[in-house]
Amino acid sequence: MITFNNIVKILTILTLSISLFSCAKPDWSKVGEPDGKKRAQKNVEEGKGVIFDFGKQKGGGDFLFASSNPLWRASLDTLDFMSLSVVDYAGGVVITDWYNDQGSDEAIKISIKFLTNEIRADALEIGIFKRNCKSSNNCIVNKIENNLSDQIQKKILKKAAVYSKDLEGILKKKRPKKKWGGDDK
């Protein structure tokens, strides 16, 4: 007779066996760095981790979050003529306030959604909205479907490529040079 306890045991054994057999075999031929701090620093330099220095007081610091993302920086620089209403790096969204020329009844708003951090054509989703107000209580908002969003996207991608190249140069200068041959002491 199959009881509830037997079903739980069978499911547990199946789950454990699947998880154990799906694990990749570790490569034991590589020798790891025995010093934890050096290993952590190497992981941070390779982009694999984060160092939290709570106890140390330093003058200044390296802020490598949004400012190190070339696509993010290029987007903010491209939209610098407009005031921003929403800027959410974690959510990957930038939305501007309504922008209009003096005396005009029309205004535009631009929204950028970041789909990836990689610099490529499908990394951004740009929406441009147009507001036309005949009076203070009578406004119509429409999404604009023209090549302006393509032009903005191209400008952002070009700037991001330049920023990425500059960032690579800065990171190469910060990395310690490897010594080939001889002692590393």
Image (cartoon, rainbow, N blue to C red):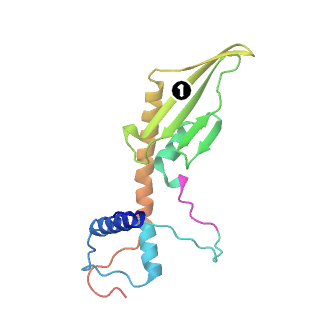
Instruction: Residue 164: give x, y in percent of width and height.
Output: 42, 51
- Work out which quarter of the rendered image holds the C terminus and state it: bottom left
Give me the residue at 45% from left, 68% from top: 44
In the image, taking residue 42 as reference, residue 22 lies left or right, namely: left
Residue 102 appears at what percent x and percent y?
A: 70, 20
Q: Quadrant of the N terminus?
A: bottom left
Q: Return the residue nearer the eye: 59 or 95.
A: 95
Q: Nearer the viewer, residue 83 or 130?
A: 130
Please give left or right for residue 152 compared with residue 79 in the image. Answer: left
Q: Amino acid at mark 1?
A: Ile
- Identify the residue shown where x is 43% and y is 84%: 35
The residue drawn where x is 37% and y is 42% is 120
Tell me the quarter of the picture where residue 131 sits.
top right
Query: Considering only vertical position in the picture, is 7 above or below 71?
Result: below
Residue 170 versus residue 78 in the image, above or below: below
Q: Which residue is mark 1?
A: 128
Over which residues does the magenta segment extend? Answer: 60-66
> Would you place residue 4 above or below residue 161 in this image?
below
Furthest residue toward front: 1
Q: Residue at x 47, y 80 (%)?
A: 37
Residue 25 falls in image quadrant: bottom left
Residue closer to the observer: 113 or 5: 5
Question: Which residue of the protein is positioned furthest toward the top in this rendering?
Answer: 134
Q: Main secondary structure of the magenta part?
A: loop
Q: Position of residue 167 (x, y in %)?
A: 44, 56
Disc 1 secondary structure class: strand
Q: Nearer the viewer, residue 20 or 174?
A: 20
Position in image of residue 45 (x %, y %): 43, 68
